[in-house]
Amino acid sequence: MRGGAALLFFLYLFALAYGLFFAEMYGRTAPRTGVWRYNFVPFTEIRRFIRYRKLVGNRAFFINIIGNVLGFMPYGFFLPLVIDERRKGGVVCVSGCLMSFCVECIQLVTQVGSFDVDDILLNSLGTILGYCILESGLAALRQMVSLRLAAGGIFQRPDEFVLNDFVFTEEEEETWFSGQENAAAVPETGQGIRRRQKRHRHRREKQKCNAA
């Protein structure tokens, strides 16, 4: 599943780069004017678009305000799945902020846009929202799996589930498995049995090494 998340993340980055640097509909291919445009005062452009929303039009408002948030939500959603930093929200959020800063610098230097600190703020907000959506979804999955196991009296380790790499942390697995080693387990799937047998072989080999 992590491979699928990595593929989607790569496709997202490709689409993001195209929209930020090459999309004609966003004026990225317009002739260079030789003028560097920038805004270093936070909330200046945000207030301007909100105050003059009717004047600039709904499309410009959506692209510059809503679009900057939505554009980075997939970044905060997919990055933790790819780098396995789902428990370190600060790392993901700082990464999104730095990513946005690099984009703004490239746009300034290449004159395919402008450096706007408000864009960095909105992009960072999008990263945080994407991460929160991911964590909320994983929390719901953990709750669902826990209730399903508890209801059936099933004492399988969480790694019997395909989504375990993303749903359960190592600490949660150890907590779950603590005290369940000798519990009676219901019949498992073929894949679950093979995994359990593999763990048992590893334990026996480890015990032999320790005994030697």
Image (tube, grey):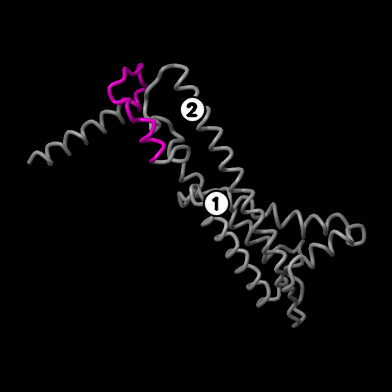
- Which residue position is annotated with label 1? 9
Q: Nearer the viewer, mark 2 or mark 1?
A: 2
Please tell me in which quadrant of the rendered image residue 161 appears: top left
What element does badge 2 sit on? helix
Residue 111 position, x and y percent, is: 70, 76
Please give the residue where the numbered disc 2 appears in the rendered image. Answer: 145
Q: Residue furthest right?
A: 55
When the figure is inspected, residue 25 is found, relative to residue 84, above or below; the finding is below
| In the displayed structure image, the side of residue 6 where residue 24 appears, left or right | right
Between 61 and 18, the one nearer to me in the picture:
61
Residue 8 part of the magenta-drawn span: no
- Percent coordinates x, y for residue 212 in the rendering: 7, 41
Q: Residue at x 45, y 21 (%)?
A: 150
- Image quadrant assignment for residue 199: top left
CB within 8 Å, label 2 to label 1: no
The amino acid marked with disc number 1 is: Phe
Span shown in magenta: 171-193
Residue type, numbered disc 2: Val
Left or right relative to 44: residue 107: left
Q: Secondary structure at mark 1?
A: helix
Residue at 35% over, 30% down: 177
Which mark sits nearer the N-terminus, 2 or 1?
1
